[in-house]
């Protein structure tokens, strides 16, 4: 039922520019749009900036190519927005505003009727999501949300379609690793990216299997989040944690990885300032 509703909505849209991060949701939306409209009326756009991990861009390009869809890589400049750099609780509003302000004219220049994002039904229930508001203000379509697709639905159908992204771990932008109230800078984004790449490699060498890894920037401290089942193993390996450079101290979050963990700190600023 939901799949039929999604297909109908995509056909009604006529043509689409998909804001394609390369994650499971936007990948599924891109595949669904391609099935509904054909590759000629669908374009994937992956915004390139210092907040996008390099390996995510490569994976996005490969996926779009596998569908026969044009893949654009327009540059965005979130750093030019004071609200983004200030990194208050509404940082995602300014990030999404920049994205849509860049993608809308790109869509128009390619003769595409709409810009669509991969926002799903779970996202809309997840509490504080200022980015959703910014996209809505700019007229972005949300076909997955409108059809009631949850994250589990996305993964289930993606698997049945043979999409390589069906079980891809969450991969939020690098700025989501920086605690609110700490200025977002290219240097901080680069430091976090290097830390996560180094940590993943060290965990692999140590034989510690993890799905999700985050290095949260709390200023002078780094907080490591991994799968809850791997927390004790990682905490017991200071040699593995030692690969994280550029921080005075490194700690392991005993609760493990959870999406949007830094939102928990909004009510407790004294813990991270």
Image (cartoon, rainbow, N blue to C red):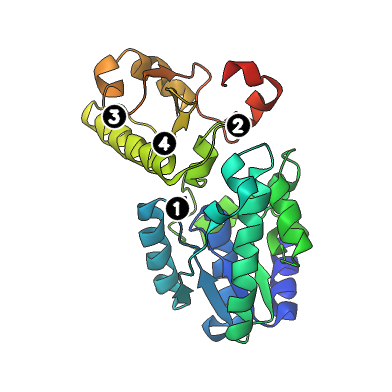
Dot 3 alpha-carbon crowd within 10 angstroms: few under 14, some 14 to 19, many 20 or more? some
> What secondary structure is found at the residue carrying circle 1?
loop
Q: Nearer the viewer, mark 2 or mark 1?
A: 2
The residue indicated by pointer 4 is: 211
Helix, strand or loop under label 3: helix
Front-most of 153 and 203?
A: 203
* Numbered label attached to residue 181: 2
Q: Earlier in the sequence, mark 2 or mark 4?
A: 2
Task: Check disc 2 and report its element: helix, strand or loop.
Answer: loop
Query: Residues under labels 2 and 4: Cα distance?
Result: 28 Å
Q: Which tag, 3 or 4, sits closer to the chain's start?
A: 3
For label 1, the crowd category at 10 Å Cα-Cα, with few meaning under 14, some 14 to 19 and many 20 or more, is many
Q: Residue furthest toward the left?
A: 205
Q: Residue at x 54, y 37 (%)?
A: 183
In this rendering, the answer to whether 130 lies above or below 207 is below
Neighbor class of circle 4 (other Cα within 10 Å; few <14, some 14-19, many 20+) is few
- Please name which of the two marks, 3 or 1, marks the residue nearer to the observer: 1
Q: Which mark is residue 52?
A: 1
Viewer-side residue, 106 vs 71? 106
Going 54% across and 86% down the picture, which residue do you hit? 40
Residue 152 showing in the rendered view? no
Report the Cα–Cα distance between label 4 and label 1: 19 Å
In the picture of the structure, the residue carrying the numbered disc 3 is 203
Task: Indicate left or right for 7 with 84 as reference.
Answer: right
For marks 4 and 1, the one nearer the N-term is 1
For residue 174, side relative to residue 271 (left or right):
left
Residue drawn where x is 65% and y is 81% of the image: 15
- Please state the horizontal and vertical placement of residue 98, each as a whole percent of the image: 61, 60
């Amino acid at each position: 039922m939901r799949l039929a509703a999604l297909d109908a909505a995509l056909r009604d849209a006529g043509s689409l520019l998909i804001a394609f991060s390369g994650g499971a949701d936007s990948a599924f939306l891109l595949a669904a749009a391609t099935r509904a409209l054909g590759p000629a009326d669908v374009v994937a756009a992956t915004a390139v900036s210092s907040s996008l991990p390099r390996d995510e861009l490569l994976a996005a390009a490969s996926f779009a190519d596998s569908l026969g869809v044009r893949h654009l890589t327009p540059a965005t400049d979130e750093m030019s927005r004071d609200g983004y750099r200030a990194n208050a609780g509404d940082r995602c509003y300014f990030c999404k505003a920049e994205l849509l302000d860049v993608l809308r004219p790109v869509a128009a220049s390619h003769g595409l009727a709409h810009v669509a994002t991969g926002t799903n039904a779970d996202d809309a229930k997840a509490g504080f999501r200022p980015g959703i508001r910014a996209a809505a203000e700019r007229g972005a379509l949300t076909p997955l949300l409108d059809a009631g697709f949850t994250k589990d639905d996305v993964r289930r159908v993606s698997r049945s379609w043979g999409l390589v992204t069906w079980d891809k771990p969450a991969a939020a932008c690098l700025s989501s690793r920086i605690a609110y109230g700490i200025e977002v800078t290219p240097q901080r984004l680069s430091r976090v990216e290097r830390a996560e790449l180094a940590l993943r490699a060290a965990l692999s060498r140590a034989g510690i299997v993890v799905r999700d890894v985050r290095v949260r920037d709390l200023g002078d401290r780094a907080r490591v989040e991994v799968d809850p089942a791997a927390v004790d193993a990682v905490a017991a390996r200071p040699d593995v944690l030692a690969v994280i450079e550029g921080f005075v101290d490194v700690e392991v979050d005993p609760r493990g990885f959870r999406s949007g963990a830094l939102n928990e700190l909004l009510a407790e600023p004294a813990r991270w300032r």
